[in-house]
Image (spheres, helix red, strand yellow):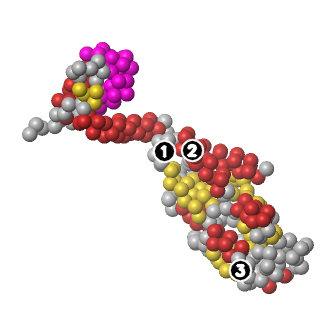
């Protein structure tokens, strides 16, 4: 059995160029080489792999053999992998992060986040992104534990000496209940009335804000770790609570949820801040995310 030698990357690329151009002459023009050099590279590749890649007899154009067709996808994969490797090296040399781990508060509008990440993929194709979606202090905890490079967190995160913060925007919050709920009445609700009814509260999975209450008025509360579950329970009439307005706009329009006029309600703005460790400042990709999220949140609030 003939020993198979590792093929040259240049020969593999020449093989792919011949296939794409449909001729040795076309490949030579594209590569800026003599036809004899292209022909020699293909002959060398066939020798290294001990296969015949093209049928050359009886045709002015080279035709792939069965073996050539069988190896074409692997040749593409080799070239693509090397291109990805070179792109990553260029990114590192330019100062781009090898990976961006992003933690985002569950209150951030999903459409804003999705479009930002779509554009991120176009802007930084060589930077893998790891996304975490959490609530309250759990977002900051990911940065503190170095599991996230950058975070977009909610309000009232405790000041930590290791963490740098920067305001990036806010999300409008609305107190709501289902139409059949006792609080779902026209006009302002009497002071203290909300305390008599079960309040659904988003709870924290992090010790950073553990035990702290955010806009909790009722001594009777159910604490939920999932915003989607809270939304579903509100629509079923199981308690009242606050939700980001963008998540319930359709429910308010359809009448499935009604806005409550609570005299106790605080500011309707849920502030959002960017967080990162002071000893790990954001790189170019993270700075782009920071600038874009600030701009896009501002536009979404208009």
The numbered mark, 3 or 1, whose residue comes first in the sequence reads 1
Look at discs 3 and 1 and give the one toward the viewer: 3
Residue at point 55% right, 40% down?
122
The numbered mark, 2 or 1, whose residue comes first in the sequence reads 2
* Residue 2 part of the magenta-drawn span: no
Hey, which quadrant is residue 63 in on the image? top left
x then y, percent, for residue 273: 67, 56
> Left or right of 181: which side holds 60?
left
For the residues bearing labels 2 and 3, Cβ distance under 8 angstroms:
no
Highlighted range, magenta: 8-36
Q: Which residue is mark 2?
A: 120
Q: Which residue is mark 1?
A: 127
The numbered mark, 2 or 3, whose residue comes first in the sequence reads 2
- Give the Cα separation between the discs numbered 2 and 3: 39 Å
For the residues bearing labels 2 and 1, Cβ distance under 8 angstroms:
yes
Which residue reaches farthest front? Answer: 58
Badge 2 crowding class, 10 Å Cα cut-off, few under 14, some 14 to 19, many 20 or more, is some
Height in image: 271 above or below 68? below
User: Is any atom of residue 78 visible in this view?
Assistant: no
Quadrant assignment for the N terminus? top left
- Give the Cα separation between the discs numbered 3 and 1: 44 Å
Badge 3 crowding class, 10 Å Cα cut-off, few under 14, some 14 to 19, many 20 or more, is some
Residue at point 64% right, 56% down?
110
């Amino acid at each position: 059995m003939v020993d198979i030698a590792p093929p040259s990357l240049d020969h593999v690329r020449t093989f792919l160029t011949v296939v794409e151009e449909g001729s040795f002459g076309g490949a030579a023009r594209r590569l800026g080489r003599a036809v004899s050099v292209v022909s020699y590279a293909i002959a060398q590749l066939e020798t290294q792999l001990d296969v015949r890649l093209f049928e050359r007899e009886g045709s002015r154009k080279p035709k792939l053999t069965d073996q050539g067709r069988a190896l074409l996808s692997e040749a593409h994969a080799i070239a693509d992998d090397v291109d990805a490797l070179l792109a990553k090296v260029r990114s590192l040399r330019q100062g781009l992060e090898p990976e961006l781990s992003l933690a985002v508060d569950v209150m951030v509008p999903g459409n804003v986040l999705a479009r930002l990440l779509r554009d991120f993929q176009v802007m930084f194709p060589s930077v893998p992104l790891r996304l975490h979606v959490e609530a309250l202090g759990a977002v900051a905890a990911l940065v503190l534990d170095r599991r996230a490079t950058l975070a977009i967190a909610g309000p009232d995160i405790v000041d930590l000496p290791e963490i740098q913060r920067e305001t990036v925007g806010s999300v409008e919050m609305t107190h709501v209940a289902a139409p059949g709920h006792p609080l779902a009445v026209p006009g302002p609700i009497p002071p203290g009335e909300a305390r008599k009814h079960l309040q659904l509260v988003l709870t924290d999975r992090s010790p950073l804000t553990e035990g702290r209450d955010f806009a909790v008025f009722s001594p009777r509360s159910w604490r939920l770790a999932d915003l989607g579950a809270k939304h579903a329970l509100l629509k079923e009439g199981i308690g009242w609570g606050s939700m980001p307005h963008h998540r319930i706009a359709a429910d308010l329009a359809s009448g499935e949820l009604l806005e409550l006029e609570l005299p106790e309600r605080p500011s309707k703005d849920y502030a959002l801040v960017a967080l990162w460790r002071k000893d790990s400042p954001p790189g170019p990709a993270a700075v782009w995310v920071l600038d874009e999220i600030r701009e896009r949140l501002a536009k979404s609030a208009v």
